[in-house]
Amino acid sequence: MNKNFKIIFFCGILFFTVSNVLAQQQEYITVTGEKGIGKTVNGEMVREFVGNVVLTQGNIRVTCDQAIQYISRNDAELIGNVVATQDTLTITTSHAFYYGNQKMAESNSGVMLNDKKVILTADTGIYYFDLNKAIFNSNVKLFDTASTLTSDKLTYFKEDGKAIAVRRVKIVESKNIIKADSLIHFRDSRITYAFNNVRISDTSKSSFIYGDHLEDYPSKSYSLIDKNPLYIQIDTSYVKEVDTLSPGKNDTSIVMQLDTLVIKAKKMEAYRDTINIFKAEDSVEIVRGAFASRNDYTVYYRSKQEIVTDRLNRESPQPIIWYENSQLTGDSVTITLRENKIRKLTVNRNAFLLSQNEKYRKRFDQLSGSKIIIYFNDNGIDLTEVFGGVHSIYYLYEDNSPNGLTKSSAESAKIFFENKKVSTVKLFGTPTSEYYPENKVEGSELAFTLPGYILYNNRPQKNELLSTLKDKENFIMNSKANSFKLRHTINK
């Protein structure tokens, strides 16, 4: 075989291969209809079809009322009752363009996609048949058996069951609603990743979690928020108030209060299964009514109505609890709620309690021990129990005037309260007490402190925590949260 023949033979094979590839890449569309007219427009050959129009290209089939086929471009304009199908996929619209070289359909006249697993609608849309990919814009809605997703723009990958949504994104499920600037959602696993201005709300519990990055795993009933998280739960509680509507006749008003629990941290996790646990970690701040806390780690057992604050390690600072004019510290603090009210505080290991006098602000009652338990009734603190190496300092008053203080120690103690003031102190186990008269106390209050005395001035404030909300909803509780009354009159 001579050299020239080899070159010609090689060129022939190359030409055949390239031609075959181009033919596959530029598979021409076929259009038929009841009536067809051929003409030339601006030097381009055009065919118009009317009545039962059918466009086909491979396994793609489109029907419509009217079509204009641009032969050289391998495109077609489709008009009236447009229905495109490919395997289990169906796309419907009133007007569309089909681009044969890209195997792509585009509509600006309202479009609906149905692949037997989801229904996707929007004002405009593009679908790439070879890529099984849809890009829909404006008033986008994606429906399946478990949720509804809305956004301004959505890219849907049919084979992967993956949706990427941006701008004003919202997913509504049976109990949860997720909002975000953008998110990635997987249809089969239900996994969702949301980004920026994220809000996940549990409508059954009136709880909300905000942040800028969310991972939600419904099959595990688990959510992670690890960027600027903020948790809010709205609860209602009822208290009785004695009122007078007319001279000589009293009634009782049942007051329904909105108690707002606000938690801020650097990382939050929510377990929504039967355990129903919420966790906050690192720089945790909590506010609820007269209660506040700073700590490293908080676990909120929502079903049990119990909040546990702890330190992550021995080097971490102790949790700090504030309640009204009192400050508590300890290695671990458990808050027990009943009917959405704090009923018990349990401080374990290295417990320390400070209580500031409302009138004499430099005077702090102090109490330390290995464990402190505080019981509450509707009016506030009812009883305090202290165990293990009890030490205390209590300021005394006579007719609301200062009257010195008492320093005491014992193995255990019980302190009873009336009208938010100490009424009785009982010491057990070889108690000792020492009285200091007022002339030795006045002006020297800081000389009377127990070991471990530290007054913290960084109490979290609800308004400061809520100020981080980017959507500025004024959150229901900010405008209404004080209280409103449902009156039930009881004649006396």
Image (tube, rainbow, N blue to C red):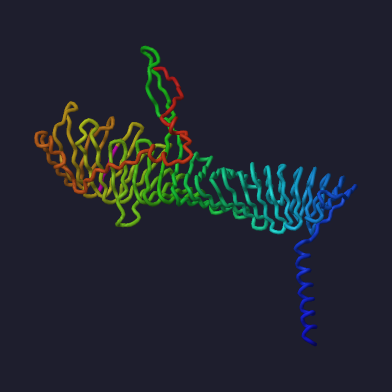
* Image quarter hosting the N terminus: bottom right
Residue at far right of view: 35
**Count of numbered badges drawn on the protein:** 0
- Who's the residue at 62% across and 49% down the image? 154
Q: Look at the image and say whether residue 385 sits in the magenta stretch.
A: yes
Q: What stretch is highlighted in magenta?
A: 383-387
Residue at far left of view: 439
Q: Look at the image and say whether residue 356 sits in the magenta stretch.
A: no
- Who's the residue at 29% across and 49% down the image? 330
Question: Horizontal and vertical percent for residue 398?
Answer: 16, 28
User: Relative to residue 207, is residue 457 drawn left or right?
Assistant: left
Question: Horizontal and vertical percent for residue 356?
Answer: 24, 36
Question: Horizontal and vertical percent for residue 125?
Answer: 69, 47
Residue at far bottom of view: 1
Residue at far front of view: 43
* Image quarter hosting the C terminus: top left
- Who's the residue at 77% across and 72% down the image? 17
* Residue 89 vs residue 325, the one in the foreground: 89
> What secondary structure is the magenta-colored segment mainly?
strand
User: Relative to residue 264, is residue 315 drawn left or right?
Assistant: left
- Who's the residue at 37% across and 36% down the image? 289
Question: Horizontal and vertical percent for residue 385?
Answer: 27, 42
User: Relative to residue 94, is residue 136 drawn left or right?
Assistant: left
Q: Is residue 135 above or below residue 291?
A: below
Examine the image and state in which quarter residue 355 appears.
top left
* Residue 142 vs residue 49, the one in the foreground: 49
